[in-house]
Amino acid sequence: MAEIIDLETHTDKRGNLTVIEDVLPFAIQRVFYIYGVDSSERGGHRHHRTIQAAVCIIGECRIYNNDGLNEAVFHLDKPSKCVLLQPSDWHKMYAFSEDAILMVLASEKFDPDDYIFEKYPD
């Protein structure tokens, strides 16, 4: 099941520095980011192999998650919050603020055969 990871953040008078180091259970093979989203939903799939870590580095969005047993909604509203998505997590991203930039770190390179679009049965 997906989970929130609070990323290590150092704050002083100069600002904030958030670190992603030794907290992900995978080596990063791909980085992408989503921005300029209207009222559309993104995602709508799960994977055979890929683990993902999602951070809304600017703005905010929500991630709905269903692992076949449990459902959850994660509100990403600060860049020190990360959602770790397992391959079995069917997810969709939505409710993007106008300025939102959602960065995703993935354990695998893009492979169209890794995607499963069917939702879990109700």
Image: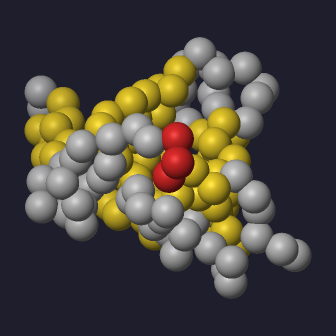
Q: In the picture shown, does residue 83 fall above or below 43?
A: below
Q: Quadrant of residue 73?
A: bottom right
Q: What is the quadrant of the C terminus in the image? A: bottom right
- In depth, the one of 68 and 57 nearer the eye is 68
Q: How many marks?
A: 0
Residue 29 drawn at (x, y percent): 24, 43
Task: Judge left or right: residue 69 versus residue 79.
Answer: right
Name the residue at the right extreme.
122
The residue lying at 52 percent from left, 75 percent from top is: 1
Task: Judge left or right: residue 102 versus residue 74.
Answer: left
Q: Is residue 74 visible?
A: no
The residue lying at 55 percent from left, 36 percent from top is: 60
The residue lying at 53 percent from left, 21 percent from top is: 35
Q: In the picture shown, does residue 78 fall above or below 8?
A: above
Name the residue at the front extreme.
113
Q: Quadrant of residue 118?
A: bottom right
Residue 57 drawn at (x, y percent): 39, 33
Name the residue at the bottom extreme.
69
Task: Judge left or right: residue 3 versus residue 105.
Answer: right
Residue 90 drawn at (x, y percent): 64, 61
Residue 32 drawn at (x, y percent): 39, 30
